[in-house]
Image: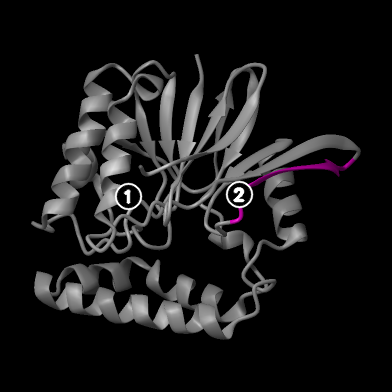
Amino acid sequence: MASLFIADLHLDDSRPHITDLFERYLAGDEVRQADALYILGDLVEAWVGDDDDAELPTRIARATRAVRASGRPVYFLPGNRDFLLGQDYADRAGLTLLEDGVVHDLHGRPTLLMHGDTLCTDDVAYQAVRRQVRTPEWKANILAMPLQARRAFAAKARADSRAHTGATMESIMDVNAEAVAQAMRGAGVTRLIHGHTHRPAVHEFTLDGQDAQRIVLGDWYEQGSVLRVDADTVDLRRLQST
């Protein structure tokens, strides 16, 4: 069997065909026969709290809970859009929460799992904001706001993010090679899987004299992107939405 990885779905009511694709994929044979499904962050465009009563979180939970009920674990590692997702929703959705930077043994090979945003160290402005919003105090203050206020805050944050992306060189928003090397050395691995940059690829390189691999997951804005890993192969492919 294989381990499956997805990330950067950015599910949102404005792209219902992608939510439909997500539900169909999770209900399909590949997922139901896998060793495990990993979601490495940015499952939604914005997460405003586990108490969100909108339809989309309910649909997501129904799909992931069904996978878990079939006997397949569903691991979730938060990204920069859904780091407020907590244990309450995870329990309802059948998710096992993972810390960014965890190492899992995939068919005999220790593999570092990350969302990927901490590797983009050249984007100094983003990293400064990230440090601020990940503090317990900031998160507690946001979650204490009324739900409607959180939705408005999330909409503004998305607009600010689009403005920052449009004004920043693409190379700055990609991973930094030394940050990748340091993360892999610190974890003692020669393989890393991450998302965030929306640049799907399998990179082969040398790390401290050893063959190493960095796999970048694709986004789900126009189609799906799935990584299938088993003992012998690594297959990164697209899923068409129609």
Residue 202 on the magenta segment: yes
Judge left or right: residue 238 versus residue 143.
right
What's the magenta bit mostly, secondary-structure-wise? strand
Q: What's the residue type where badge 1 is placed?
A: Ile
Q: What's the residue type where badge 2 is placed?
A: Pro
Q: Read off the residue under disc 1.
A: 18
> Who is closer to the viewer here, 41 or 18?
18
Number of other residues with Cα within 10 Å of mark 2, as a class: few under 14, some 14 to 19, many 20 or more: many
Q: Secondary structure at mark 1?
A: helix
Residue 103 on the magenta segment: no
Q: Residue at x 53, y 49 (%)?
A: 218
Where residue 157 sits, quadrant-wise, is: bottom left
Q: Residue at x 22, y 21 (%)?
A: 69
Is residue 112 shown above or below 33? below
Magenta residues span: 199-208
Q: Position of residue 56 (x, y in %)?
A: 18, 52
Spatial CA distance of label 1 from label 2 is 18 Å
Q: Read off the residue under disc 2.
A: 200
Is residue 126 shown above or below 111? below
Judge left or right: residue 147 versus residue 74.
left
Does the residue at mark 1 contact the one at mark 2 (Cβ under 8 Å)? no
